[in-house]
Amino acid sequence: VLAELIEKFVSHLSESQMDCYFSMGSYKAVEADVKKENLSSVQKLGVEMTVRYGKYLNLLKEDAENGLCFVLMSCEEFLKQQQRTVVSSLCCLQERYAGYDWFASSIFLIMSGDRERTLMFLQQFSCLLVSAFLWLPRLHLSVHLPVTTLEYGIHPVYFCSAHHIEMLLKAELPLACSAFHMSGFTPSQICMQWITQCFWNYMDWSEICHYIAICIFLGPDYQIYMCISVFRHLQQDILKHTEA
């Protein structure tokens, strides 16, 4: 039901010129083309974990690994159309996105391992503003960002979402905020970890689905509210750890 709901919602928005923040491009995934690209060791490890988790949730079948590899490589090729070349020694500014694509993997699981359906959704989703915040590889070396912003190697989620999370945390949960400052560890660091991984390893699968759906339906600012609500939920534990 969730898969169908987000599909229809995103499809409807992507047809509206007013809601399209980015251009969609015209990419057609071809099996022969994507096979030329090899996955990195980080991606291979991510695929193993995703497939194992998907089978545990009874969402994936035995041949799911090939389908997920196809989706990840197709996404890479598709997003390359909207990337620019930046000469830099920073690891995060190399041609390939340095991490694993947790968002595309989450959508693959929501779509029960249907690779064509997953790719169709991601292509339509990529033209919406919320894709910049939920799907981190979306803005990797993106032509949609100023060159000066790209050269710093800091993802917009860090200076947009994470910045606002810190501001809201100070106002809403001053004790938790102070605890973080005393530890010398900023809330934005842990939030970037949560957001980059789509809350994998932190929330149950149903909650991960709720996070993705809420941000798609209500807007990217709900990413901020979600993190604040998690901090509120964890506040007593945070204070207890600070005392200890």
Image (cartoon, rainbow, N blue to C red):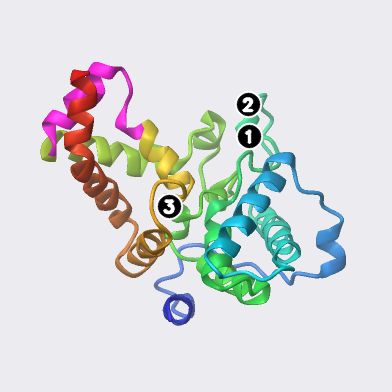
Q: Residue at x 40, y 73 (%)?
A: 18
Q: Mark 1 points at which residue?
A: 93
Q: Mark 3 points at which residue?
A: 133
Q: Which of 25 and 50 is in front in this view?
A: 50
Mark 3 closeness class: few <14, some 14–19, many ≥20 residues within 10 Å:
many
Q: Is residue 146 magenta?
A: no
Task: Inspect the image, locate mark 1, and give the three-letter code of the amino acid beneath it.
Answer: Leu
Q: Nearer the viewer, residue 203 or 15?
A: 203
Q: In this view, does 142 lie above or below 128?
A: above
What is the distance, in whole Å, between disc 3 and disc 2 at their CAs? 22 Å
What is the distance, in whole Å, between disc 1 and disc 2 at their CAs? 5 Å
Q: Mark 2 points at which residue?
A: 90
Q: Is residue 43 above or below residue 244?
A: below
Asked if the residue at tag 2 contacts the one at tag 1, i.e. Cβ–Cβ closer than 8 Å, the answer is: yes
Q: Tally the numbered discs.
A: 3
Task: Inspect the image, locate mark 3, and give the three-letter code of the amino acid beneath it.
Answer: Phe
Q: Residue at x 17, y 24 (%)?
A: 178
Q: What stretch is highlighted in magenta?
A: 173-188
> Does the magenta stretch mainly form a helix, a strand or a loop?
helix
Name the secondary structure under disc 2: loop
